[in-house]
Amino acid sequence: MGGDFAPRNVLLGAVEALAMASNRFEIILVGPEEKLRNELKQISTGHAKFTFAEASQVIDMHDAATAGIKQKRDSSISVGMTLHKNGNVDAFVSAGHSGAVMSTATLILGRIEGIGRPTIGTFFPTVEGVCLLLDAGANVDCKPQHLYEFALMGSIYTKEMFGIDKPKIALLNIGEEETKGNEAVKEANKLLKQSSLNFIGNVEGRDILSGEADVIVCDGFVGNVILKFGESIPAFFKHQIKKVIQENLLFKLTGLVLRSTLRKAFKSMDYEEFGGVPVLGVNGVTIIGHGKSTPKAIRNMIFRAEEMARKKINSRIQEAIQQ
């Protein structure tokens, strides 16, 4: 029931996922069953078959992040997360209230032993491929140990999900020198240097898209500012290109010729391609999607959740912490 266009986009995305996967997994739809069934009647579901889990409440964007635990225990987020906790499902996916999903996952699923704070990652395209940035907004204030844990979890996720043997880890800072930054960043630098991770040192904001690092670590305050700024870039460039093209006929003709090229260039910056972002550090697989998620984004969120569950990312994190 989460997202600006729920439940329609969620249902369309779920139908697409099952069709493309030839029903190799099961999807349980959590929410008011009657409403969901009525909505499904209005779309073409093909051979897709769903199971339903009744949830009478919905957490909206005006609710507190803790609403799923305190005020709305029968919300689709709480009910779905409880299904995951009890082993009835292998992963939970939502395009709803990000804070509520994060806090509910932490409280219901619990943290992986040894992890101080779970984190949300986000993806940025680079000239080399993709960069995972942690934290993207879950933890505004972080201690050095938390930043180290983010790096560890990010390294495992990137290795398992993207097949990078030794992911390059970097610490986001205001300069490359070890003496730069606040105390938390300086201490985190020391921890990372002493670790077995492939730590390449500090990087600056201009290095995020360069492909220099596979994982970049920062606190959630900085990470969320970067994320929101990054989301504005494609729309800005499209506006500027359209503005220039409309200036004269020659530019319009050139624009028509370059349209497919530009579409491909912007594809790597499209959040729909990644679907959603993972919550790392909880005892379960949780994917958080954009509130404006399209059916395509929902579909890709489901595939990402399936892959995380199949590759047992949490077990890999637990093993690394124990070592």
Image (cartoon, helix red, strand yellow):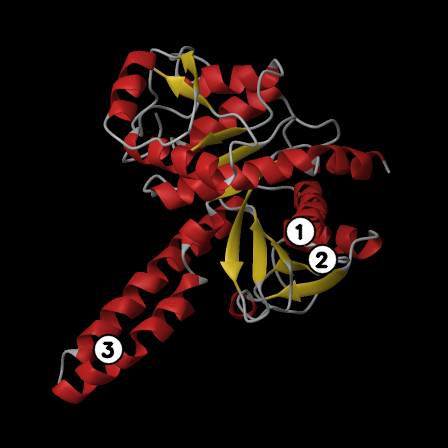
Amino acid type, label 1: Thr
| Quadrant into which the N terminus falls | top left
Q: Are marks 3 and 1 in contact (CB under 8 Å)?
A: no
Q: In the figure, 178 relative to 148: above or below?
A: below
Mark 3, secondary structure of its residue: helix
Percent position of residue 140, x then y: 51, 41
Q: Is residue 74 above or below residue 122?
A: above
Label 1 and label 2: CA atoms lie apart by 6 Å
* 146 in relation to 239, above or below: above
At which x and y percent is residue 98?
Answer: 43, 34
Quadrant in the rendering for residue 89: top right
**Residue type indicated by callout 2:** Ile
Label 1–label 2 contact, CB within 8 A: yes
Seen as rendered, the residue at the extreme bottom is 250
- Identify which amino acid the numbered label 3 is placed on: Leu
- Tell me if residue 157 can be seen: yes
Judging by the rendered image, the residue that carries numbered circle 2 is 164
* Mark nearer the N terminus (1 vs 2): 1
Q: Give the numbered dot on residue 158.
A: 1
Question: In the drawing, does residue 136 fall left or right of residue 285?
Answer: left
Q: Residue shown at 51%/46% (left/top)?
A: 136
Which comes sooner in the sequence, label 2 or label 3?
2
Q: What is the number of the mark on residue 256? A: 3
